[in-house]
Amino acid sequence: MSILSDAMTSPQRTAASQASADFETCFEALWPRIYAHLLGMLGDPAEAQDLALETFYRLSVKPVVEVGQMTGWLYRVATNLGLNALRAQKRRQRFEQTAGEQDLLLHAPGDAAQEAERRLERQLVRQVLAQMPPRQAQLLLLRQAGMSYLELAQALGLNPASVGKLLSRAQVEFARRYRTLEGDL
Amino acid sequence: MNKHFNESQIQAYLDSALDAAGQARLETHLHGCPECQRAFEAAHQRSEQVQERLSLLQTQSAAPTLEQARAAFSVYRERKENTMWKKLLSPAQRPALVTVVVILLLAASLAIPSVRAAAVDFLGLFRVQKIQFVQIDLGSKMGDLDSAFQTFGGFLEEQVKFAEKGKTVESTSLEEIRQLASFPIRMPTYPPGDSWEYSFHPGIQAEFTVDASLLQPILSELGDDLQLPQALNGADVKVDVDGGFTARTGDCNRYLEQNQRPRDCITFTQVRSPEVTGPMDADLQELGRIYLRILGFSEQEARSFSQNVDWATTLVVPIPVNDALYTEVDVDGVKGALLRTKTSGNIDLNPYFTLVWIKDGILYGISGRSSTSQALEMANSLK
């Protein structure tokens, strides 16, 4: 939010066009994954797209992200946006189905009753993610997205040696909350 | 000798993140230790269950094609950059409204953690009398700070309603503009003989409701010591920024057209310090401490800094240390702040500067490209 940060950028042609080429490459490579990640979190394609666009927008205005950290950065920002959205949602509705949910199931589509049950389960998962401590939810989601311990440590600023313990605690927390919510049904 | 394994190692094993030697040690140990076997089994089961539940979220829905995504991104970016915040922060507008931007930063920073509701019984007026710039090093604080700022920025855009009180009026007649302003307009008399263009912007009102359920998770991410005071939740905050006067001299048109920084354009801005309403007994020091923590100060630093600031009358504006040089200067009979961009090392030796000070409840700003001494002389020549 510095009023002078933009005033700093010197008009070096090559640097600017290089930066936009990098961004384009990044967009091409990672848009599908980031979108899919957010769609999984939110269940609503329109909202997922909106947040994916926001994620890439933030990348586009960020002065420097080292190439090696770009993926981790994008996932982390996307996950945060998704969690914020889930928390905002949770204020409005509990088990209501998200409007416009059109996703095909990873598993073979069963009959209507089974699908309804799956939907309910997904809503429960989302609720737990929304309610649990954000750092822990973030860790679980990023791990689920396929990040290694080292990548997690880098993306979240953690000591690599503590990733295991933090994941374990996050899982315990998730399981506990899920059981509680399930019990409320 | 058998060593029992802790949860960290068990989890790492389950995630295939344990080195070969560690794996072998664990497996060997498990053979002979029923207690650890039980712990392991429990962890294994739990880990599987959680992962299975999370994988329920995975979908194979048809994603937008790359072309669609690119197109959507262009539209999105354009929309973002045409929001009011961005308009005010865009290079073309910056010289004209640089001090108003500082004030909006003040309004925003005061609105988020630092101001309490206009409660029924206790109303007090905070009027900024002093600006204090504090240098922060964004580089050393990775990820969380930056992400939190982004989230706050997004939060501001979505949650803060603000409205312009009217349209900008432009004129070459100072008298005409003087009549529009509700405070006395002073003008530099140095350099003599300069021709100025004037404009007046009626001002901005911002309204905002504190929603703890949205804000607290953001704060929690930054630190466990950051708790939004309960009394803030649901509070309505109003900020009123009175009209802004701007005068420009030099080759400013070329600047505006080419959307680049000006070569010889100097902008002088004058606006009344904004009003924020809040209860007199607000725990400003605590809120100030939270604000500093958000900026990236450590717990210790934030605490000691916060104790030395009179938050009711001082606006603390963060300046990333890599972007600008900050010096305190004597100007117009008060202490002011001089910010200069770090020289980029090309032929042009006059860096872009901004000089800001507050006197008698009026916020002044001069910015442009010039030598520091010229800027100060201009500032000291106000009548």
Image (cartoon, coloured by chain):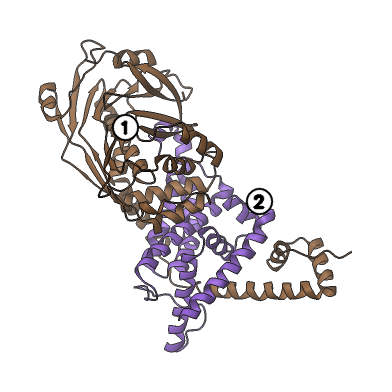
Chain colours: A purple, B brown
SS at circle 2: loop
**Chain identity of mark 2:** A
Q: In the image, A35: left or right of A146?
A: left
> Residue B311, how many percent across, how many down?
38, 35
Q: Could one spot residue B137 in this view of the protein?
A: no
> Residue A43, how many percent across, how many down?
42, 70
Q: In the image, A23: left or right of B44?
A: left
Residue that appears at 57% across and 67% down: A173
> Residue B345, how many percent across, how many down?
48, 22
The residue where tag 1 is placed is B128
Q: Could one spot residue B219 in this view of the protein?
A: yes
Kindly check if marks 1 and 2 are in contact, taking CB atoms under 8 A apart as contact: no
Q: In the image, A7: left or right of A67?
A: left
Above or below, comparing residue A185 to residue A129 in the picture:
below
Return the residue nearer the eye: B224 or B331: B224
Residue at the extreme front: B121
The residue where tag 2 is placed is A159
